[in-house]
Amino acid sequence: MGDVVSALREALGDRAVLEGETGGGAPDWLGGARRTPALAVLRPASTEEVSTALRICHAHRQPVVPQGGLTGLVHGADTNERTLALSLERMHAIEAVDPVNRTMTVQAGVPLQRVQEAADEHDLLFPLDLGARGSATIGGNIATNAGGNRVIRYGMMRENVLGLEAVLADGTVVSSLHPMLKNNTGYDLKQLFVGSEGTLGVVTRAVLRLRQKPRSENVAFVAVPDFDRVTALLARVDAELGGMLSAFEVLWDDFYRLITTPPAENRPPFATRSAFYVLIEALGGDEAADAERFQTVLARALEDGLVVDAAVATSAADRARLWAMRDDVGQVRRHAPVQTFDVSLPIPAVPAYVEEVNARLGERFGEVVNFVFGHLGDGNIHLIVGPGDREPETRQAVEAIVYGALAPRGGSVSAEHGIGLEKKPWLAVSRSEAEQAVMRAVKQALDPEGILNPGKIL
Ligand code: FAD
């Protein structure tokens, strides 16, 4: 193995090969970082250097783990003493912004937040947004097909990438940097790499789709008495806001109480208690008219009993406060150790699913907490369950309950975080044997030696 590191050092230079460094790792969702050891960390500075590095690794059958900002939540970027980490940290340039075509060409190591800021400077929007924006990279967002808060309006990362460049396991550069929305010239190769978690190629550059920056932003937090009215409200605001709906975040009452009770700093926005709460956001093009329309839609929802109380933000500070409340997931540490889950299922199946999980957790463990919230407009909910995972048997038992109840409902064990190592044992809950066989065939075709992120997903 020493040979491969020497060959890489000779080809790429000392700056690009760090030995004795730790590589990989993964934070837990609540911010605890975890590092993993690596044979060495490669830090190529260009696509050519990535290609050279992979060509050498391929010849030596040396496993390589691509790494971005190390914010992934399923141990997809974990290394071990025998694997090399390939970090994109030196490839962070924004190469071009085309305000007319509404595209941005970037290197894969650029942090998401820098892309958002660069779009903003051109009065444009890169709509993907998530809590780890400061560290998460575009390459990592692509490799995990990241979602976030505004998927209901703008789609996942998949919908926001027009072209990309990737380097295959043997060093071949596949340049698919097309800047068009429409391009039906055979297989859409870029989509092969989106969500592939570093197992099919190293993403080195991308052409991102930008949107016009919204001129109005309206946010409300509302109380809803039951799940039927949550889904009725979703249909209502989606129809009546005329395409402006950009977030529909639902909080179950237990989670709401947790984040609005000291030591949490958020104060309840109204006195009413209810079974569900929804944060609604609308982005539009006319400040005055949109605010009026937003309030009219909410007033009608109140009149019709879909909503029993509402707090409408009247300033940027109000909007930030309501979002900060929704995002104050760290409060669950008060119940540590906990296990976090990111699942999706058809929206009508959600309440019975949550009830079944709660009932089974209660039967198995007696005292439990299960904080539920999420991007319900996308059928995506997060569950944070105590008892936590100090004991492997407890972890497995909780996973069996949470994931087991998805299978009969056609749900997914991973809505947006990916499979990595963490969810690998549960892939079969969401993917048939035939689907897994196709995945293995694709992997075999692109990486026959199995050197790219071995052991992840499959
Ligand atoms: P890493 O963690 O470094 O890697 C993740 C995976 O991508 C690994 O499998 C790695 O091998 C692969 N990879 C990385 N770069 C490349 C590359 N250039 N080429 C090929 N493969 C590569 N996710 C959501 O979808 N929605 C959310 O709302 C959300 N919120 C989050 C909030 C917090 C606080 C945190 C910590 C994470 C959150 N995530 C969320 C997880 C999300 O998947 C990651 O934050 C992000 O997309 C990963 O980017 P990264 O650069 O950190 O990748």
Image (cartoon, rainbow, N blue to C red):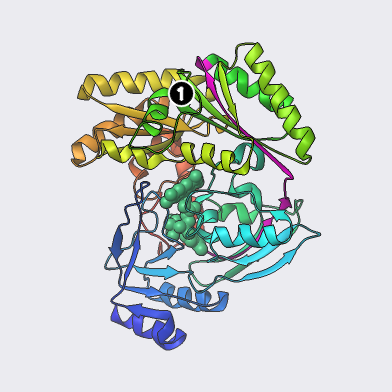
Q: Residue sitting at 56 percent across and 41 percent down?
A: 149
User: Residue 222 lies in what quarter of the image?
Assistant: top right
User: Which one is nearer the viewer's eye here, 230 or 175?
Assistant: 230
Q: Position of residue 349 (x, y in %)?
A: 49, 20
| Tag 1 residue | 409
Quadrant placement of the N terminus: bottom left
User: Which one is nearer the viewer's eye here, 168 or 35?
Assistant: 35
* Residue 233 seen from this side: yes
Q: Residue sitting at 65 percent across and 11 percent down?
A: 304
429 relative to 136, above or below? above
Q: Residue sitting at 48 percent across and 49 percent down?
A: 131
Q: Position of residue 378 (x, y in %)?
A: 56, 33
User: Per the image, is 429 magenta?
Assistant: no
Q: Position of residue 80 (x, y in %)?
A: 29, 64
Horizontal placement of 404 versus 55: left or right? left
127 relative to 12, above or below? above
Q: Looking at the image, which residue sits at the far right?
A: 100
154 relative to 272, above or below? below
**Amino acid at the residue labelled 1:** Arg
Horizontal placement of 246 versus 81: left or right? right
User: Which one is nearer the viewer's eye here, 243 or 166?
Assistant: 243
User: Residue 284 lies in what quarter of the image?
Assistant: top right
Horizontal placement of 56 versus 103: left or right? left
Q: Residue sitting at 21 percent across and 25 percent down?
A: 365
Q: Which residues are magenta?
A: 203-227
User: Per the image, is 226 magenta?
Assistant: yes
* Residue 446 seen from this side: no
Query: Pointer 1: residues within 10 angstroms few (<14), some, or many (20+)?
Result: some
Q: Position of residue 69 (x, y in %)?
A: 45, 61
